[in-house]
Image (cartoon, rainbow, N blue to C red):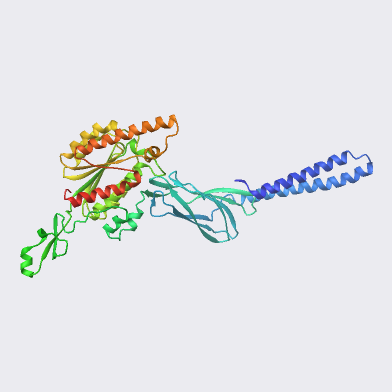
Amino acid sequence: MRPGPNLLKILVGWMLFALVVFAARLFSVSSPVETDLLVDNVKFGSLELLWWLSSGLLLLGLVFDFLRHRRFWKLSVVRELPHSLALGVKASVALDIRNGYPFSVTLDVTELYPDCIEAEELPFTLTLAPVSSKKVIYPVLPIKRGEARFGLTGLRVSTRWGLWQKLQWVGGEEAVKIYPNFAPIANSAGIGLEHQIAQMGVHLQQRRGEGSDFHQLREFREGDSLRQIDWKATSRQRKPISREYQDERDQDVVFMLDCGRRLRAKDDHISHFDHALNALLLTSYVALRQGDAVGMMSFAGDERWLAPLKGPARINTILNQLYDLHSSLETSDYLQAAEKFLQRNSKRALVILISNIRDEESEDLVVATELLSKKHIVMVASLREVYLDKKLNEPVSNFSSALSYCGMTETVRRRRRALAKLQGRGVIMTDSLPQNLHIELVNEYFKLKRSGRL
């Protein structure tokens, strides 16, 4: 219990009354005339008696109001959490607060919410009518992936006379998972895949009917090549019939995700690692829709392995595997990761390694990609910092900025040289800004599918 606002106001009035009584005592003592002294003593005695009576009544009121509200048994709170949360996307949490007393209750409400959540509108104040309930909704913003565990709900309740406030914890603990922001992909699941990809800026090279798996026979169309004509079917139907092919299915696509310190950088409120996760999820979604099997392996930190499997529902398994995965402070060992991958997966696959490639690590990565390339098609997706691009485009105005420009130019040059060295060894390369990585990955995936390499 702590004093309420009404008690503080009453105490201020009580102290002012005490000052009046004290001033009256001083005036009566200093009065020179005996008759005036008698009158003043009578007046002071009445004031003093009134002060003592008010003090006694105040004390009784304080004790009575304290004892009858030592605990508010008939106040309850039911929390309603969303089924899941998406990183960086605002959501709402509902509190159903019920007052079972025959009098109104004023209370301050707060929540024990986790560090991975921002809730700017807590605490809040409300008044509940007698025997009623009220549903209050407050917004939350997830700022970190993983499990968000909400604790008890705190109610600071004012007693009926407002003399005291009681802090009471009600409700229970609940948890909700914070996933990468996969909502834009899920919301557009009903759109045709190629139209959906085109909206994102990915350009597909159309090669109608020239995949590697036979799909169906159909009438010859303008633009079909002569080698597509099925001459036996043409002679039977007495009109040109073409064979239509589709891209080969049942291939494996496996991501090797670097969880080391290279992807801890941030250019905005989302880290490079979260951008990499979003790109991995989108490319997985596209590959699964194309009939391929998708797997994942993380290294340089929390090591996880998900064997390649196919089916549209597989994306939920990948989400649950990755939602609480975070980057670490470890240095990435590409060669060790390649060796572990080869021990786990022997079937030919498209291996997509996502990292931030630097010149000092290029030799280790070259050896790792050569090892992987003996059995698999290897793609390296590298993220580059937005900061470097911005600084290189700024004008050079003084000696200090000239030195900074030269240093960054050398860093970029060495980095490009490392990437070119990998590309010269037959590795498929993408080098993109974090926010464009998902487009680059999907683009390269479709190029491989259309070329027949995958």
Which residue is more in the foreground, 151 or 249? 249
Q: Position of residue 144 (x, y in %)?
A: 40, 45
Residue 324 at least partly seen: no
Which residue is more in the foreground, 161 or 183? 183
Q: Position of residue 336 (x, y in %)?
A: 23, 34
Q: Residue furthest bottom?
A: 238
Residue 352 at least partly seen: yes
Which residue is more in the foreground, 72 or 309? 309
Q: Position of residue 327 (x, y in %)?
A: 34, 39
In the rendered image, the vertical position of residue 404 relative to residue 198, given as above or below:
above
Q: Position of residue 42 (x, y in %)?
A: 87, 46
In the rendered image, the vertical position of residue 200 relative to residue 362, given as above or below:
below
Which residue is more in the foreground, 124 or 50? 124
Horizontal placement of 82 versus 312: left or right?
right
**For the image shown, how many numbered marks are present on the structure?**
0
In the rendered image, the vertical position of residue 294 relative to residue 246, given as above or below:
above
* Residue name at image x 13 percent, y 65 percent: 220
Horizontal placement of 229 versus 419: left or right?
left
Horizontal placement of 60 versus 382: left or right?
right
* Residue name at image x 90 percent, y 46 percent: 39
* Residue name at image x 20 percent, y 51 percent: 449
